[in-house]
Amino acid sequence: MFRNWVLAARIACMAACLVTSAVSEAQQRETVITCINPASGTSWQISIDFDKVTVDSKQAKITPATISWFDPADGGNYTLDRKSGDLIAIVASSTGGYFRHGRCALETSR
């Protein structure tokens, strides 16, 4: 009986390792997500490449909680909350700067 229990434990461990590996591999690719400006309803897509650690080909910092990057085209420092989908851009300007808010659908990036 002890031998069966040990065998069952080993099989369960191997199954867990395979699932973890598959999830990890699935995340290690490029993911395109759609974001929406809640004020105007305008939508756009961003491309996150977990292998190259980039967002729309711009260097990013990817942590379990957030993805952040700088876009030199508009001078925005973007932060995407990976749990809620909240997207915040902080843009510096001669008048002191401003914030932009968005919401991203993260179903495909998890």
Image: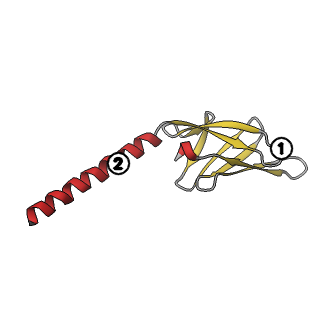
Tag 1: Cα neighbours inside 10 Å, few (<14), some, or many (≥20)? few
Indicate the amino acid at tag 1.
Answer: Ser
Tag 2: Cα neighbours inside 10 Å, few (<14), some, or many (≥20)? few
- The residue that label 1 is drawn on is 40
Give the percent coordinates (x, y) of residue 19.
35, 48
Is 19 in front, or is 54? 19
- The residue that label 2 is drawn on is 19
* Residue at position x 87%, y 53% in the image: 96
Q: Which quadrant is the N terminus positioned in?
A: bottom left
Going from N to C along the chain, the mark reached first, 1 or 2, is: 2
Q: Image check: 10 left or right of 80? A: left
* Residue at position x 77%, y 45% in the image: 37
Indicate the amino acid at tag 2.
Answer: Val
Give the percent coordinates (x, y) of residue 66.
59, 53
Is 92 in front, or is 49? 49
Residue sticking out furthest to the bottom: 2
